[in-house]
């Protein structure tokens, strides 16, 4: 094979690999948002500052969920684990039985320390 076709093949393979990496991240974020809508029982909930940390096997989606509760709009941070070994977790005030201290610990260790930029 001549050098140019080899280079084109390498570029095509690299492009295909990086394209699929973006797909799993978008799918994981969409799944996390759906789980949070179910957890807080608000199909109209919206999200901001959403970021996925870690990898496709053991990562987590972290962000802020915005929900209408009666006449009030509430915002709370959330964590959804890709491997479903824990959670999902949302800050107290939007349906979580977890204490604020426990949530803050999980947020720091599983979001911030894992690269959350939000």
Image (spheres, rainbow, N blue to C red):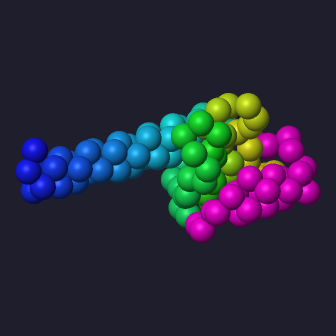
x, y percentage for residue 100? 87, 56
Residue sitting nearer the eye, 71 or 14 = 14
The residue at the point 74 percent across, 62 percent down is 113
Count the marks.
Answer: 0
Task: Answer left or right for 110 relative to 55.
Answer: right
Q: Which residue extends farthest bottom?
A: 117
The residue at the point 83 percent across, 59 percent down is 104
x, y percentage for residue 24? 44, 41
- Is residue 40 at least partly visible in the picture? no
Image vertical order of residue 27 relative to residue 65, above or below: above
x, y percentage for residue 108? 79, 61
The residue at the point 29 percent across, 50 percent down is 14
Quadrant of the drawing holding the C terminus: bottom right
Task: Answer left or right for 82 relative to 16.
Answer: right
User: What range is drawn magenta here?
Assistant: 95-118
The reply to whether the magenta stretch includes residue 117 is: yes
- Is residue 82 at least partly visible in the picture? yes
The residue at the point 63 percent across, 63 percent down is 116
Residue sitting nearer the eye, 56 or 26 = 56
Task: Answer left or right for 74 relative to 46.
Answer: right
Task: Answer left or right for 7 relative to 43.
Answer: left
Residue sitting nearer the eye, 22 or 73 = 22
Q: Which residue extends farthest top?
A: 84
Quadrant of the drawing holding the N terminus: top left
**Within the image, what quadrant is residue 35 found in?**
top right
The reply to whether the magenta stretch includes residue 112 is: yes
x, y percentage for residue 33? 54, 44
**Within the image, what quadrant is residue 38 found in?**
top right
């Amino acid at each position: 094979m001549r050098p140019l076709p080899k280079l084109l093949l390498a570029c095509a393979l690299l492009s295909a690999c990086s394209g699929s990496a973006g797909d799993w991240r978008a799918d994981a974020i969409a799944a996390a948002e759906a789980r949070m809508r179910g957890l807080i029982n608000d199909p109209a909930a919206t999200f901001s500052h959403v970021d996925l940390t870690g990898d496709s096997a053991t990562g987590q989606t972290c962000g802020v969920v915005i929900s209408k509760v009666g006449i009030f709009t509430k915002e709370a941070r959330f964590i959804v684990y890709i491997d479903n070994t824990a959670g999902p977790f949302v800050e107290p005030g939007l349906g979580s039985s977890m204490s604020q201290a426990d949530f803050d610990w999980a947020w720091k260790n599983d979001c911030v320390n894992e690269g959350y930029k939000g």
